[in-house]
Image (cartoon, rainbow, N blue to C red):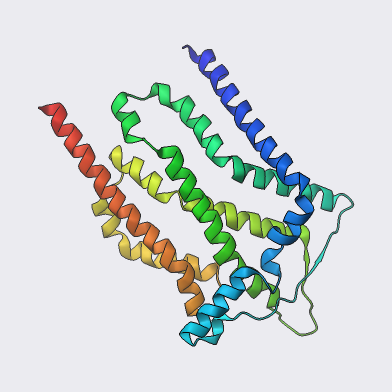
Amino acid sequence: MNFLDHIEDLRWHIVRSAFAILIGAIIVFIKVEWIFDKIILGPAHSDFISYKWFCALGRALHYDAFCLGDIKMDFQNTAVTGQFMMSLSISLMLGFILAFPYVLWELWRFIKPALRPNEIRMARGIVFWCSLLFFSGVLFSYFIVAPYTINFFGNYQLSPMVKNIITLDNYYDTMANMILALGIVFELPILVYFLSRIGILTPEFLRAKRRYAFVILFILAEVITPPDLFSCLLVFIPLYILFEVSVNISGRAVKAKKKRDAEKEE
């Protein structure tokens, strides 16, 4: 295929991906009022399921700080078309999340013809693993990070005379950024795997930088959680486990690369 043929092929992959996202968005839009109230605003409700889990865990550990207080937040819409545009934004975001495996599959179909047989074997199951990690990050953000973040900032007050009245846009942007960002961050093992296979990363380098990774991940966890040690650890521990998994994956990838290079020399 010449360059223009590749562009034409890519265009159709993008069109099919966009169509899949659109179908997902339409499905969400049909029930967008219920989804907005029960899912998007879920962490803003005091009876959100995560708060019940945290409180049950706190009772089991005899640590009352896990039982978060009632949320005192009021929302407002400041634009004529604000609520309608919000429903479209929610539909597109959730449509993208629902269609994520298909979008990855279309990307894989475009890349696959350019790969050698051994490279295709190396990437076997990539759509499944990327999708699994992405959804794990989304669920972790929604059920763990978002409740603590919304609860802390929703109840934070400089003065009793100042009431928190949050705009819909600000609340939605905060939720969407957290959910999509952690969905992408959870793809770290896949990125490390491929960088290790092509020789850019090594497990020795990652182990040597472990102390810096520890500090960076702890700071990141502290930023996105309330200023409480146990709350911070709830986020830090999974992120650090993800880093250690990436180190292990890098070691396996480098070992496989050395074995393949030795076979070529023989």
Residue at the farthest left position: 266
Left or right of 169 in this view: 152 = left
Residue 85's place in the image compared with 117, above or below, is below
Q: Where is residue 132 shown, x and y percent of the image?
A: 47, 48
Residue 21's place in the image compared with 133, above or below, is above
Left or right of 29 in this view: 6 = left
Residue 67's place in the image compared with 30, above or below, is below
Residue drawn at (55%, 71%) of the image: 225
Residue at the farthest top position: 2
Residue drawn at (77%, 59%) of the image: 168
Q: Where is residue 81 shown, x and y percent of the image?
A: 87, 49
Would you say residue 43 is visible in this rendering?
yes
- In depth, the one of 51 and 203 nearer the eye is 51
- In depth, the one of 53 and 238 nearer the eye is 53
Question: How many numbered callouts?
Answer: 0
Q: Where is residue 131 shown, x and y percent of the image?
A: 49, 44
Q: Where is residue 212 shown, x and y percent of the image?
A: 35, 63
Would you say residue 182 is visible in this rendering?
no
Residue at the farthest right position: 80
Q: Quadrant of residue 114?
A: top left
Q: Quadrant of the C terminus?
A: top left
Residue drawn at (66%, 69%) of the image: 48
Residue drawn at (36%, 35%) of the image: 123
Q: Quadrant of residue 26?
A: top right
